[in-house]
Every structure is written in structure tokens, then in C-alpha cells.
Image: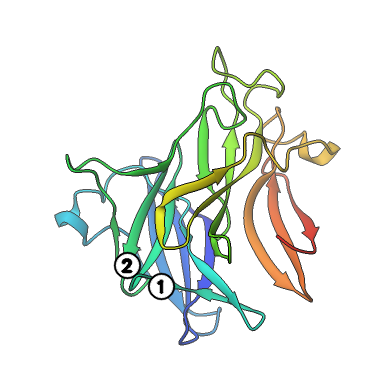
Amino acid sequence: GCEDPRIVERNDGTYIVAYTAWNRDVARLCIASSKDLVHWKKHGPAFGNAYEGKFVNIWSKSGSIVTQLKNGKITAVKIKGKYWMYWGEKGVNLATSDDLINWTPLVENDGSLKYAINIRAGKFDSDLTEPGPPALLTKKGILLLYNGKNALGENTDKNLPAETYSGGQVLFDANDPTKVLERTDNYFIKPDLPHEMRGQYKAGTTFIEGLVYFHKKWFLYYGTADSMVGVAVKNSL
């Protein structure tokens, strides 16, 4: 499968999509590019050239590239000379790039993957933290909307059904995309409508993936248990 696409535009008009390549064995974060949104060139795994291929075969997905709204248009933006991307599933990792195609994951001193945020026991994101739409550089910092899954068992948020997918927010430092400034303790969107409570995930799903700025409003698109696509609208973030 070619799943979970997140799309950004580069300043030169090239469109870049980060998507999950699923071969029923390992989910790999991959990159494709296009000039017209019709004809696409696949570039393979995002981490294929990093660290001599060390992270090619790890489970990786959901690439949220940092963007900026300028003159009514959202485009990918560099911070300290690099493009940045939040990615991952059980926790949120980071990567940088010079061209939006070849990405290098951030690692700790021991070579293990660096985490920007991780799951939290007893909260809506106790089982999963997975990036949503492309992150957005704002005056207050980098806003990442992400998906949280409630755990099944002792770590569950007792105010939500176990295994519910809902949305959270985290704000990173504008000059240091690894530094958390604020993070919501609770979800800002959760399943509560009939079509959000049926489908593949019976506990309910609002899985956010697309964010569009149109007519001075923000349109947040989300999946509802792999059955429908929903949209929520807000005047400002």
C-alpha cells in the first residue's frame, strides 16, 4: 500500500509527499515528488541514504514536514538551514533534510533514535503518538497536531474508551524543533458523532492528517475509523 500521505509545497513549486509504503512486513516512510500533482516520481525510503541505511528497515511512518503560512500560502520552511520533519508512531521522532527528499533521522549519543515526545500513561495518548498534518511554524513556535491512541489496560485514560483515537497538540521552540514549549494534557478533537464511532476501529476514531488554509479559515481533515473523511473548521489556530 501507499498510505497516510502528507503533502507540502517547496518554494520552487515542487510538491513533496511523505507516505507510508506498506508491504505487509514493514511500514516504511517514503517520499515522492511532483510538479503538477498528477505525475509523480517515487524516491524510495526517506532514510535510505542516512547512516549507511541503518534505518531503512525500521517501522517508520507519518512524516509531518514543518511548513509556514506566508501571504496566504503554506510552503515548507527551513530552520537553521535545514528542513525538519516529525515522524513516527509509538513516539514522535525527528529528521532533517537539505532537499525534502533525502532525510536524516536525529539520534542520541548512543545512536538510538531521538524522541521529540512520547506516550504518556493515563492520558489520551497513552498507547500512540503519531504526527498529523504538516507542522506549522507560527509566531509562538512550531505547532504539531498529532494523533493519540488510548491504551488498553492499566495505562489507559479512564475518561475515554480504550483504543480511542483522538487529536492532541504540542508546541516546539521556533529555533529548536526538538524543544517542547507546551503540550496539551487532553485531546482537542475526539470521536463523538455516529460516523466516527463505527468502522474498522469500534472505540471511535478522529485521525487527523490534512490541514488547509482557505478563505482565512483552517480546514482540518481527518479519518473516521477507515470509513469516512471528516472536516473541522476554525477561524484561527
Left or right placement of residue 56 versus residue 27 in this view: left
**Residue under label 1:** 78
Task: Work out whether residue 177 or residue 30 is closer to the camera in this orientation and state it.
Answer: 177
User: Residue 193 occupies which quadrant of the picture?
Assistant: top right
Task: Work out whether residue 73 or residue 90 is closer to the camera in this orientation and state it.
Answer: 73
Which amino acid, mark 1? Answer: Lys
Quadrant of the image containing the C terminus:
bottom right
Q: Residue furthest top?
A: 154
> Is residue 36 visible in the rendered structure shown here?
yes
> Is residue 45 visible in the rendered structure shown here?
no
**Is there a contact, CB below 8 Å, between mark 2 and mark 1?**
no
- Gap in Å between the C-alphas at discs 2 and 1? 9 Å
Q: Position of residue 210 (x, y in %)?
A: 63, 60
Q: Residue furthest right?
A: 194
| Residue visible at 72% across and 21% down in the picture | 159
| Residue visible at 75% across and 74% down in the picture | 214
Task: Work out whether residue 218 or residue 184 is closer to the camera in this orientation and state it.
Answer: 184
**Residue under label 2:** 97
Task: Work out whether residue 21 or residue 100 is closer to the camera in this orientation and state it.
Answer: 100
> Which is nearer the N-term, disc 2 or disc 1?
1
| Residue visible at 26% across and 51% down in the picture | 56
| Residue visible at 48% across and 67% down in the picture | 17
Which amino acid, mark 2? Answer: Ser
Colouring scheme, one of rainbow, by chain, secondary structure, one colour: rainbow
User: Residue 133 occupies which quadrant of the picture?
Assistant: bottom right
User: Residue 211 occupies which quadrant of the picture?
Assistant: bottom right
Secondary structure of the residue carrying numbered label 1: strand
183 lies above or below 121: below
76 lies above or below 200: below
- Mark 1, Cα crowd under 10 Å, few <14 / some 14-19 / many 20+, is some
